[in-house]
Amino acid sequence: MLEQEGKHAAECKTSANRALPFTKRRRGGVVSLDDLSKVLGVSIRTLYNDVNAINDCLAGCNVGALRVASRSVDCGRVDWSRVSELALTAEGPTLSAENRRIMMLLGICCGSARTIPSLIEAFEISRNTVISDIREIKGRVRTFGAILESAPGKGYCVFGDEREIREILWNDLQTLRANDCLGEAKTLLQHALVNKSGEEIDFYELCRCLVMQYEVDLGTRVFLDGDGLDLLMIQISWLRSLDGYVIEMGREEQATLISTLSYRSVQCSAAKMRQAGLIVPDQELLYITSLLLGIKIAGVTRHSDEDAHVSRLAERLAVNFERVSCLNYVDRSIVCQQMSNHIRPLYYRLKYGLQADNPLVNDIRRVYPMSFEFTRRAAIETGLGELSDDELGYLTIYLTAGLDRKMFEEGDTSSENVLIIGAESNATIELIKRQILEACGISFNYTFLELKKVRRWELDRYALVLSLVRMPPQMRQSNVVEAEPFLTGRDFKRIFKVLHSNRIISGYQGMIDEVIDIFKENLPSAKQEDFDSDRLFFELFRYFSKKPYETSEKLPQLDVCSVIEGVTTAPTACTWQDAIRCGCEAICERTGSRTLGDRMNNLVQSPKIQWYRMTPEIVLVHCPMQGDEHGLITAEAVDCPGGGVQFPDQRMASTIICLTTIDRYSHWSALYSIYKGMGSLDSIFTPIC
């Protein structure tokens, strides 16, 4: 009997807490039941029950009672001055309709109340109110891609991607905290875990102990939410996983988390709880680890979305590397595919704030200093931020490996392959091979083709293309030399010019230049042309290439002012396309090129144009001169007065640097010098000022 009376008193107080705050504001008047239903978010039937419960509580206190008539509540018969003195006043937070629906969804997801009768009992509302709330909850979870349905024998359940369901619950906990109703959520989860495990322990405190052990194991501090939302999410993960709902992580994400000390700490704590009869599924240990690590970047909810996100990152990184380094991959899709294999673990390391360990990073920076710098800039353009040198080292290897295979080994500026076109006999071939060997000291790998079998795009695969027949104009590019079988001094001069950009030879460039400079300083009476001759250069190359000396890529020592050979002032109030045209016209006048202007006039109207914002005020534009007989590597600075010109990124640029290229790689030294010398660019514009 006493238990029934206590339960009845509690029900009366709950009803009073819901309705009295509103009726007191209308003391002495009449309140419409429709208004009450709208404000409190309950049905009319629930309000009738609440009024009866309130009158039961007021009975015997001689303070009057509420009266319901004509779908209204008459508050004029209550002595409110005496009611305020009674203990039966509305204290503590009152669940609004929004908070009640959040608590209802939390109960459904965590298994504490799933059927309509259990929800009626838990929240003390009518069946119509429960059905109305369920309808609202269905619409809300549907916006997150989840579904609320009733399963036979189980009641209501939420189906969908588990990451999205956890995201819904996380947002709901934040709403409860803002509405000062978080205590109700803690109580609900505690009761659910007690019922599920059969253990009468404080699960919230148990989660706190797990975090404290984590801090001890890692020697760090976990900055969790001040109101313990993270601890509540751990409890939700236990309840959801015990019902068979776990977050499915990809193989790469699992491998990233399992390799951390954080996971091992959580695993040890779970083993201790297992001994006490509290079993946490292994799959949830990864999720708990991710909670403790924290999400350091904006997370992507679906695993399938992560796949697409990683592919987009790899594509953007490859495109931005092309923009920054002013080149074009022969087959970008292969590079992107290889990059995706590395971008995925990199994405998870960034997601959880983990550090990579790259023991080869110092060697990578030494061997590929320019690629390393270009990779760093491309990563920032891609949105990866300032990555550590270890991460940049890995990315440099992938990006440069693609260039080595497609560009260095198969041609362009470092290949050992030479193509001879139009040779009529083996005797002619042997004659040419012997002449090149005697002049350069290099035994190349030779290929022989007839002119009609040559395709223009195949010429990029060779360090040198020696044609014994006249080439069509569209096939005359920077590595093509037209000559007779008996090579003249003029032919050798052109061959030497092509081979100077060969990566095999340029690896000794710094060493040879140093030797020549020493002789110039100690033999002032010698002829300058003797030191500058190509034959002396290749004689020294032959000598050093036979020695077992360790060589590494020597950083260019170019002055940025010598790279940027001219300065042009664009017309006031011109467009960015017009400013680029001005710079290209100046380059054409200096080089005698007839095709660069037309090519750039087409490119500025095309999305294929490559430009890169080096600083907020300076933009670099790639101006290709491949195949131009007057092509050379040079740069023109364009000063844009009147506040600058607006580029497609909707930002202004006061300076545009037009850099010309003749192949994919040989301009990197000049480009690297521009990037490193940006701080001294102001001196270039001194004559104009």
Image (cartoon, rainbow, N blue to C red):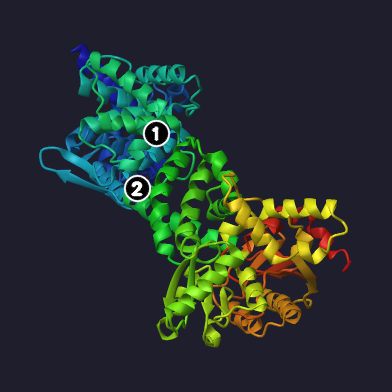
Q: Secondary structure at mark 1?
A: helix
Quarter of the view holding residue 93? top left
Callout 2 secondary element: helix
According to the image, label 1 marks what residue?
290
Q: Is residue 475 left or right of residue 21?
A: right
Q: Looking at this view, name the residue that lies furthest to the left.
A: 153
Mark 2 = which residue?
34
Q: Say few, some or many: other residues with alpha carbon within 10 Å of mark 1 (under 14 / 14 to 19 / 20 or more).
A: some
What is the x, y in percent for residue 370?
61, 53
Looking at the image, residue 195 lies above or below residue 111 = above
Residue 206: % across, % down: 35, 17
Where, by quadrant of the figure, is residue 572 drawn? bottom right
Q: Tell me where residue 385 appears, x and y as whole percent.
A: 56, 47
Front position among marks 2 and 1: 1
Count the marks.
2
Q: CA distance from mark 2 to mark 1?
A: 47 Å
The C terminus - image quarter: bottom right
* Quadrant that contains the N terminus: top left
Which of disc 1 and disc 2 is earlier in sequence? 2
Residue type, mark 2 in image: Asp
Residue 649 visible to an observer of this rendering: no
| Front residue of this view, candidates 595 and 531 | 531
Left of 487 or right of it: where is 290? left
